[in-house]
Image (spheres, grey):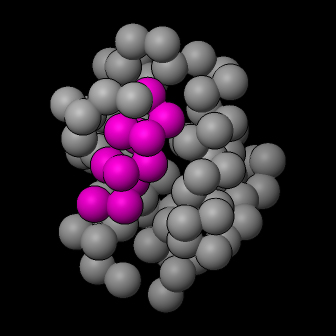
Amino acid sequence: MTDADIYSSLTEILQDIFMRDDIVAAPSLTAQDVAGWDSFKQIEVVIASEERFGVKFSSKEIESLKSIGDLALLVGQKTT
């Protein structure tokens, strides 16, 4: 899976969760950049990502996520 594929899927996930077509997954995108992104939305993003990519994240991995770039890197590591 390429980085472009990962970011494309993450964009779809974010757009579905936040019901906004203007959100585009980018490496520097953080929760602070998206109105309404709270801890509950974070859980939704993580669960949707696990389902979409067929992976599981540990609590430690989830806590280390600071940006969409971190999530994309983690997905990339787990899907190769």
Query: Closest to the observer: 68 or 50?
Result: 50
Can residue 69 be seen here? The reply is no
Q: Which residue is painted at 29% across and 79% down in the image?
A: 2
Q: Residue 11, how many percent across, how many down?
A: 32, 49
Rendered image quadrant of residue 20? top left
Q: Residue furthest top?
A: 35
Rendered image quadrant of residue 3? bottom left
Q: Which residue is painted at 55% across and 71% down in the image?
A: 53
From the viewer's perspective, tell me whether residue 10 is left or right of residue 44.
left
Task: State the extent of the magenta-drawn residues as a range.
Answer: 8-18
From the viewer's perspective, tell me whether residue 73 is left or right of residue 25.
right
Q: Residue 5, how many percent across, how many down?
A: 29, 72
> Residue 4 magenta-drawn?
no
Query: Closest to the observer: 79 or 37?
Result: 37
Q: Look at the image and tell me in which quarter the N terminus lies.
A: bottom left
Query: Closest to the observer: 27 or 53?
Result: 53
Rendered image quadrant of residue 4? bottom left
Q: Which residue is painted at 44% across and 28% down in the image?
A: 18
Work out whether 23 lies above or below 13: above
Query: Closest to the observer: 78 or 47?
Result: 47
Secondary structure mostly seen in magenta is helix
From the viewer's perspective, tell me whether residue 68 is left or right of residue 53.
left
Count of numbered tags:
0
Can residue 42 be seen here? The reply is yes
Q: Which residue is painted at 57% across and 76% down in the image?
A: 78
Q: Residue furthest bottom?
A: 80
Q: Residue 60, how many percent across, how many down?
A: 75, 48
